[in-house]
Amino acid sequence: MRDGQPGTPIRLVDYQVPAYLVGQVHLDVDLFDEHTRVNATLALRRHPDAPAGADCVLDGVGLTLEALSVDGEPLAEEAWRYDGEQLVLRGMPDTFTLATQVIIEPQRNTALEGLYVSRGMFCTQCEAEGFRRITFFPDRPDVLSRFSTTVRADKVRFPVLLSNGNPVARGEEGARHWVTWEDPFPKPCYLFALVAGDLACLEERYRTGSGREITLQIYAEERDLDKLDHAMASLKAAMAWDEQTYGLEYDLGIYMIVAVSHFNMGAMENKGLNIFNTACVLAHPKTTTDAGFQRVEAVVAHEYFHNWSGNRVTCRDWFQLSLKEGFTVFRDQSFSADMNSIAVKRVEDVDMLRTVQFPEDQGPMAHPVRPAEYQKIDNFYTVTIYEKGAELVRMQHGLLGPERFRAGTDLYFSRFDGQAVTTDDFVDCMAEAGGIDLTQFRRWYSQAGTPRLEASDTFADGEYRLTLRQSTPPTPGQPDKLPLMIPVKLALLGADGAALPLDADGNTETVLVLTEAEQTFAFAVPGTQAPVPSLLRGFSAPVELRYDFSPAQLHFLLAHDSDGYCRWDAAQRLYHAAVTRLLADPSAAEAEAAALRPALEQVLARAMDDPAEAALLLTLPGEVAIGDRLDVLEPDRIHAARGALQAELGRQLARQWWQAGQACLTPGPYRPSAADIGKRSLRHRALAYLAAAADERVASHLEALCRDADNMTDQLGALRLLVHYRLPGAAQALADFAARWHDEALVMDQWFAVQATVPGEQTLAQVRALLAHADFDWRVPNRVRGLLGSFANGNPTAFHAASGEGYRLYAEALARLDEVNPQIAARMAGACARLPRLPDARREALAAALRDVLSRSRSANLREMLERILASAG
Ligand code: TRP
Ligand code: ZN
């Protein structure tokens, strides 16, 4: 098996069309207690561009082949070969019908790829390469086929039988029944889905702009039926938004979503039958936080938007993954911004890009938005493909403007409907509709790494001159970088804080398009005072901006800039500078807090204008983000410095924090509205400062909130502060919380996460204890992420403990996880990508632990990750 050998990469330059296409496929899936029988009938025809005589190659992994026939005749032994990975048919005619029968064992499938069982329900996950674990098929996205599917199972235990498209026939045979589904739209097999179970359903209707009635169904276990309203409302909002914004309507008569407890990712856009991680679809005020409500809205929309950006127009090969993911993330970001707050959403997205994607770009896993090679495509469902990919689409939106961008997407969807295409095809449409040359822009897709943008300026004789210099550091396999096309949105603020006119028309904002390594731009500025530059407004390009802002300039921007991103960035720069000084002189916390105080007071004074934005402005950079700015990671000192600053600010502004918390009460029933969410987020920010300061009243306040609040946002927020700041009552609150929420898996995931992220080495013992807890389950990715993911990614002082114990614990867990679910193990390994930046002793300790895991790892998924990470160990 290929899985047992050192990795051979798959390369973009080797792309070839498939030798055979599949026009029509019929699947007959017979579900039993011990096994499942899959009969497949494929109408194959030679690809017009394929070399004559080429073998017909079908993928198939772990299939027990029971029968095989071509055009109704059993196939001679010498005409086929199956090596456990691929079925090769030799000497086939130009068109033929292939019938196969295979046996698979979904009950034993813990990798959650292909057909598997989750809490008694059969379900599938085929992206990226799961369909080959169900039947023989050319499992690649450039083979688009019409599917019909018959599902058979026990009537009583599996009353609901679903697949893609429309139900066209059903019947009964003794204790069993069956349903046949037909999907009229040709699709790649990664969009196939099947579900069988005893499920409850929320059903509503939606009328499209053109007057078609669509049936909307969301399926879940009966006990979760009261948690589906938010997803339903979000789905309808997304459908209306896509009609409004992109002129795109839904295309089938029925749209189904199924909630599944065991799921490797967030959700999956299977045609007409989305399958969702319960964490991304279930929402109820009692069990779901504000962040959870917003995640449901965003993910429901994301998967819905894929119906056009992904399904109707799909990817030619997996190197083009960002074609659908980057574009669809851009679409879901715009949707969430329109539903909530444009400025707040932008800051949240930028923050995530800078704290998660920038580090990926700077580490051993750095890769282009369109990678040139991979071993396991599962490992490339990354923040670079998704979030940086979205930034590339956003830059094109910015370069074209909204109208021409819409002309570009219209052209894209009409030209490529029903086809499998490339990111180049997308950019071509933008260039054509926009009437601009995007040749240089394409480098953003092929060049990895975060560009550095250095800005410097001069002001003399009424002229302001801004020099921009770009460079992109080397990344693995790409030592030399070319200049990119970088749109830099700019304003210049005058002494009164207003933006100055930059041209004869009086425009106060402009986009400088940097194309060279270095360029200088000049502006006439009246008066004798140098303006303050507001740079990279809206975060107009995914670059690291370096400009030597003075503290006075940052305070000025925070107070006056009309751009939400620039205000937030100014605050972040002030905080980073303060923490950096504190790292050198830990005794200066009081003075540093005092210096920041006017800025915070001014934000607090205006906080009720937009509490959500105020909460963001008042959030100190996290320990991980601080560490990423330093050359060498020293988690304990970072924790101490940041903690001291937070505590001092808590003390010095205690009165204002209590006031803000009071002003942000949200009386009445819980609503997940942007306004109420903003208030709660500011209130919890205020409480966090007070908790850090160990304010004398805060513990009892939090205890009461945790006990009495009618919603999970308040309960969990209070619990986390009690536990993380080790306040009186924390242990009791944890125990009470578990007793109360024992039966709610998604809430218990959070309970595990709260404990796994308590700073400090002593948490390691607690993580070990929780691994042995009766409610911990290696087979449930949400639980594994809740405990191990949050420990490894969100608790630097414990994970990087000087004893090396954090690494040992983590390495043992990785090895164990690899046996159960290689995709999740590989994803978890990403937490070590900061290895090259660790101080010597720790780097050695982590590398040793990882080498040990590598020597035992059986999956290509985990091995690819570990090999890449270890190659950076030096
Ligand atoms: N296409 C899914 C999305 O909307 C991603 C996804 C879901 C996925 N499940 C997966 C990717 C399993 C790889 C493996 O983003
Ligand atoms: Zn997606």
Image (tube, rainbow, N blue to C red):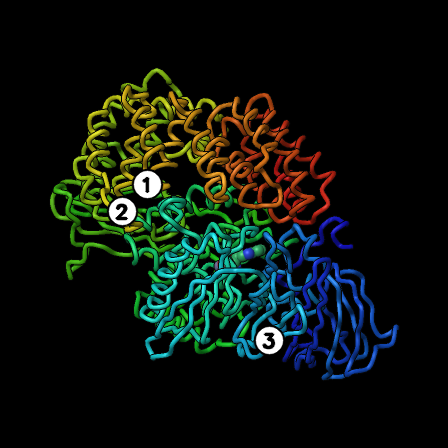
Q: Name which residue type carries label 1.
A: Asp
Mark 3–mark 2 CB contact (< 8 Å) = no
Q: Name which residue type carries label 2.
A: Pro
In this rendering, the answer to whether 635 lies above or below 782 is above
Q: Identify the image quadrant of the N terminus.
A: bottom right
Q: Name which residue type carries label 3.
A: Thr
Mark 3–mark 1 CB contact (< 8 Å) = no
Count neighbours of disc 2 (C-alpha within 10 A) and say few if under 14, some if 14 to 19, many if 20 or more.
Answer: few
Residue under numbered circle 2:
669
Count neighbours of disc 3 (C-alpha within 10 A) and say few if under 14, some if 14 to 19, many if 20 or more.
Answer: many
Disc 3 and disc 2: Cα gap in Å? 44 Å
Count neighbours of disc 1 (C-alpha within 10 A) and say few if under 14, some if 14 to 19, many if 20 or more.
Answer: some
Q: Is residue 225 left or right of residue 147?
A: left
Spot occupied by residue 3 in the image (x, y as percentages of width and height): 74, 52
Disc 2 and disc 1: Cα gap in Å? 8 Å
- Residue at the image position 45 percent from the left and 76 percent from the top: 253
Residue under numbered circle 3:
180
Which of these two is toward me, 18 or 724?
Answer: 724
Which of pointers 2 and 1 lies earlier in the amino acid sequence? 2
Number of labelled discs? 3
- Residue at the image position 77 percent from the left and 74 percent from the top: 55
- Residue at the image position 42 percent from the left and 72 percent from the top: 215
